[in-house]
Image (cartoon, rainbow, N blue to C red):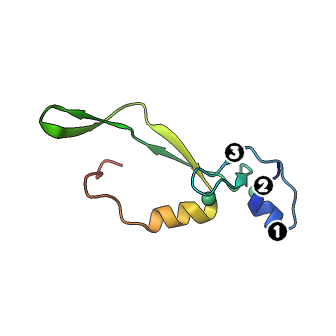
């Protein structure tokens, strides 16, 4: 499979990842990697991030949308 964003530019680049949101195949140039922390609920309903962080890979479009979206209120540590 080739990179979806490169294909839009008439370039065939082998894909190395898939966007977690839209499923587009991506090359290293178009893949955006972000860390995100899984959580567990501790006593008194306190939500605690767990180390090490997990990984999300997004395309340029989904990464931009994700960055523009307001962060959830209870996730100030993300
Ligand atoms: Zn690409
Ligand atoms: Zn995407």
Which secondary structure lies at badge 1?
loop
According to the picture, the residue beneath numbered tag 2 turns out to be: 3
Q: Earlier in the sequence, mark 2 or mark 3?
A: 2
Contact between marks 1 and 3 (CB within 8 A): the answer is no
What is the distance, in whole Å, between disc 2 and disc 3 at their CAs?
9 Å
Residue at 30% across / 51% down in the picture? 75
What is the distance, in whole Å, between disc 1 and disc 3 at their CAs?
18 Å
What is the distance, in whole Å, between disc 2 and disc 1 at their CAs?
10 Å
Q: Is mark 1 within 8 Å of ligand 1?
A: yes
Q: Is residue 5 above or below residue 57?
A: below
Residue at 36% across / 49% down in the picture? 78
Seen from the viewer's position, the closer of residues 42 and 11 is: 42
Q: Is residue 23 above or below residue 68?
A: above
Contact between marks 2 and 1 (CB within 8 A): the answer is no
> Would residue 40 appear left or right of 21 to someone viewing this image?
left
Which secondary structure lies at badge 3?
strand
The disc at residue 17 is 3
Count of marks placed on residues: 3
Residue 16: horizontal and vertical position, in percent?
74, 43
Judged from the image, the quadrant occupied by ligand 1 is bottom right
Residue 5: horizontal and vertical position, in percent?
74, 62
Q: Earlier in the sequence, mark 1 or mark 3?
A: 1
Residue 20: horizontal and vertical position, in percent?
58, 50
According to the picture, the residue beneath numbered tag 1 turns out to be: 9
Q: Is mark 2 within 8 Å of ligand 1?
A: yes
């Amino acid at each position: 499979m080739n990179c979806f964003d490169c294909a839009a530019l008439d370039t065939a680049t082998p894909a190395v990842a898939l966007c977690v949101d839209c499923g587009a195949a991506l090359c290293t140039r178009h893949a955006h990697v972000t860390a995100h922390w899984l959580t567990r609920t501790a006593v008194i309903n306190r939500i605690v991030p767990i180390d090490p962080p997990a990984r999300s890979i997004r395309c340029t479009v989904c990464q931009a949308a994700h960055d523009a979206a307001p962060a959830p209120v209870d996730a100030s540590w993300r």
